[in-house]
Amino acid sequence: MTDDIDRISLTLPSSMVDRLDGIVDDWEYDSRSEAMRDALRDFFANYEWETGGDERHHGTIVVVHDHHVDGIADELQTIQHEMAEAITSVQHIHLSHDTCMETLVVEGAASDITELANRLRALSGVQQVKVVVVGE
């Protein structure tokens, strides 16, 4: 932590303060301020993602799919090859006899990451797609 810190006041309903205090205790933050700084970093990353246009972003796309659907593996691989410039790495995990999860580490413009996620969502057999973008 640097010496260049500004003190601000935050007004919250008591129910939110109680919830914050519970999280501070549960996650073992040193203080409310540490928890709020952590939450604000996530808030800033989401803001940059939504308003950043073609700035470079980093994150993951998690895809859960039924591997018994005919052609799903080939379709996933085709999309990943077509959008390789946005994909840093891919991990494939067998969650159960019927279900697989792929985690794609991505880097690129918000529009490219969104296009990739949307193309994956549109595949028959894909059950869930989650995009998580992080700040630097």
Image: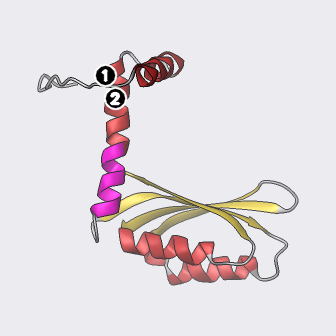
The segment highlighted magenta reads: 43-51
Whether residue 82 is visible here, answered yes or no, is yes
Q: Identify residue for label 2.
A: 36
Above or below, 99 relative to 77: above
SS assignment at label 2: helix
77 left or right of 45 in image: right
Let me know if residue 45 is in the magenta part.
yes
x 73%, y 76%: residue:
73
Residue 109 position within the rendered picture, expressed as x and y whole percent measured from the top left:
34, 70
x 73%, y 78%: residue:
124
Question: In the displayed image of the protein, which residue is found farthest to the right?
Answer: 97
Above or below, 39 relative to 55: above
x 38%, y 74%: residue:
111
Above or below, 65 relative to 81: above
Q: In which quarter of the image is residue 11?
A: top left
Q: Which mark is residue 33?
A: 1
Q: Nearer the viewer, residue 62 or 24?
A: 24
Residue 83 position within the rendered picture, expressed as x and y whole percent measured from the top left:
49, 79
Q: Which amino acid does label 1 sit on?
A: Ser
Residue 30 position within the rendered picture, expressed as x and y whole percent measured from the top left:
38, 15
20 left or right of 48 in image: right
For the residues marked 1 and 2, what is the alpha-carbon distance in whole angstroms? 5 Å
Label 1 crowd bin: few (<14), some (14–19), many (20+), radius 10 Å: few
Q: Which amino acid does label 2 sit on?
A: Met
Let me know if residue 4 is in the magenta part.
no
Whether residue 136 is visible here, answered yes or no, is no
2 left or right of 38 in image: left
88 left or right of 4 in image: right
Residue 51 position within the rendered picture, expressed as x and y whole percent measured from the top left:
28, 62
